Image (cartoon, rainbow, N blue to C red):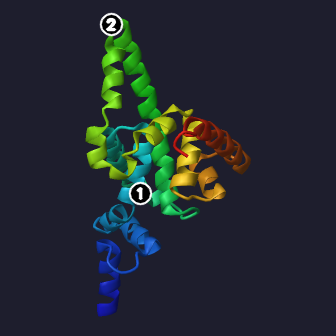
């Protein structure tokens, strides 16, 4: 009995080896506390990826919270056909796409009412001091800016493969595209990045 309780505690608290399937099974049975172990296991990695996709530390935090909230609400429908992290990434990319679309609409509206607003926006985006304090591993603004310049479809694949080390199959599953498209977009993205970062390489 004590061993069972200890295993349960390990999966929730993050101590010992994390048992993803066991934690998910407990959440699906109504154990809400077990989900905190899932959050603790994946939150940093998920946040880092979302941040690289949208380049806003504050918004990345909000999106990350929304991803876990949606995952929790729909966890009973998760069948385990893929890793739970892949499932989280699928939600994260949907949320990131909605964020980018919303951001584009906001910029379009602001520009119509105030054509000079983009000047301030560019200055704000280039001021990475606050972001660097929160996200030290992204302190190289040249690399982040190069990633930002990529088309979202290319950026998503590059981040998942070259930063998060996902397999081609995992990326295809997370983004709901074919493996051949993953390979094509990855190669295109890498070529563009090499050109932009040639002075740093």
Image coordinates for residue 158, horizontal then vertical, percent: 57, 46
Name the residue located 53 percent from the left edge and 48 percent from the top edge. Answer: 159
Image coordinates for residue 100, horizontal then vertical, percent: 44, 31
* Mark 1 or 2, nearer chain start: 1
150 left or right, relative to 137: right
Closer to the camera, 153 or 22? 153
Image coordinates for residue 63, horizontal then vertical, percent: 36, 43
Q: Is any part of residue 1 visible from this angle?
A: no
The crowd level at tag 2 (other Cα within 10 Å; few <14, some 14-19, many 20+) is few
Q: Quadrant of residue 128?
A: top left
**Mark 2, residue position:** 113
189 left or right, relative to 88: right
Name the residue located 40 percent from the left edge and 65 percent from the top edge. Answer: 28
User: Quick one: SS at disc 1?
Assistant: helix
Name the residue located 68 percent from the left edge and 44 percent from the top edge. Answer: 187
Classify the position of the N terminus by image quarter: bottom left
Q: Does the CB distance between marks 1 and 2 fall below 8 Å? A: no
Residue at mark 1 to residue at mark 2: CA–CA distance: 38 Å
The crowd level at tag 1 (other Cα within 10 Å; few <14, some 14-19, many 20+) is few
Q: Is any part of residue 110 visible from this angle?
A: yes
Image coordinates for residue 18, horizontal then vertical, percent: 40, 75
Give the answer, above or below, for where 195 lies relative to 115.
below
Q: Quadrant of residue 33?
A: bottom left
**Mark 1, residue position:** 45
Closer to the camera, 162 or 28? 162
Mark sitting on residue 127: none
Closer to the camera, 74 or 125? 125
């Amino acid at each position: 009995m004590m061993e069972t309780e200890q295993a349960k505690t390990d999966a929730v608290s993050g101590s010992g080896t994390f048992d993803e399937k066991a934690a998910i099974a407990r959440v699906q049975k109504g154990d809400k506390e077990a989900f905190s172990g899932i959050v603790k296991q994946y939150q940093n990695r998920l946040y880092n990826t979302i941040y690289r996709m949208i380049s806003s530390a504050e918004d990345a935090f909000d999106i990350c919270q929304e991803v876990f909230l949606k995952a929790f609400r729909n966890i009973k429908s998760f069948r385990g056909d893929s890793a739970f992290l892949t499932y989280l990434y699928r939600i994260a990319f949907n949320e990131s796409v909605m964020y980018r679309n919303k951001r584009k609409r906001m910029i379009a509206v602001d520009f119509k009412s105030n054509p000079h607003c983009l000047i301030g926006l560019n200055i704000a985006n280039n001021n990475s001091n606050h972001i660097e304090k929160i996200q030290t591993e992204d302190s190289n603004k040249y690399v982040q800016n190069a990633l930002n310049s990529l088309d979202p479809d290319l950026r998503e694949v590059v981040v998942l493969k070259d930063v998060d080390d996902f397999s081609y199959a995992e990326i295809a599953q997370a983004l709901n595209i074919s493996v051949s498209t993953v390979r094509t977009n990855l190669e295109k993205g890498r070529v563009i990045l090499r050109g932009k970062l040639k002075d740093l390489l």
